[in-house]
Image: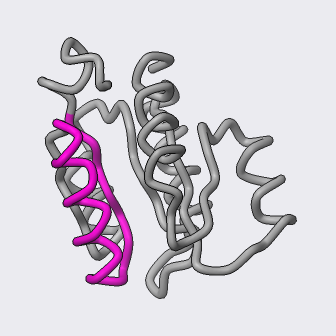
Amino acid sequence: MPDSSITSAEICYVVDDDPSVRKSITRLLEFEGFKVRAFGDPEDFLNQMATNPVRLVVLDIWMQQMTGMEVLAHLCARWPGTRVIFITGHEDRAAEATVMQAGASGFFIKPLDNEKFIAAVQDALEQA
């Protein structure tokens, strides 16, 4: 059961260039009580977040415009406390090891295990 002190005011950001994945994750998070802002373009996300602290981002690792690892580098420079949960459509142990070493809060392969994913979101927000 979600901790209402975390979820009621928390905004989870979702950055994925696949509209169906973005919509699916947004719906799942909203169903669990989170507020969601979703972006299809990582540069739009970074531009809009340039002056606002970001606590949690669900981030696709492989996008056309910019990789999730590049977005992570920008976030670490601006908001080092940001928690990031990576998602991907393809198993990639090297990428998983790299992002986890860089401090990612989770790494999930699509389709997501909803229960484990939501638990990771809650844990990441508690750590942020």
- What residue is at 46 percent from the left and 59 percent from the top? 59
For residue 25: magenta? yes
At x 27% / y 82%, what residue is drawn? 19
Q: Position of residue 35 (x, y in %)?
A: 14, 41
Pinpoint residue 79: horizontal percent, then vertical percent: 43, 32
- Report the front residue among 75 and 113: 113
| Residue that appears at 17% across and 48% down | 30
Give the side of residue 71 with respect to residue 21, left or right: right
Q: Is residue 78 above or below residue 46?
A: above
Q: How is the image coloured?
A: one colour
Residue 25 location (% of width, % of height): 31, 62
| Membership of 94 in magenta stretch | no
Number of numbered discs? 0
Q: Quadrant of the N terminus?
A: top left
73 versus 35 height, above or below:
below
Screen quadrant of the C terminus: top left
Which picture quadrant has residue 15? Answer: bottom left
Residue at 49% x, 25% y is 123
Given the current orientation, which residue lies at the most extreme bottom position?
A: 64
Nearest the viewer among 2 and 128 is 2
56 or 4: nearer the eye? 4
Q: Which residues are magenta?
A: 11-33
Q: x, y (%) of residue 116?
A: 53, 44
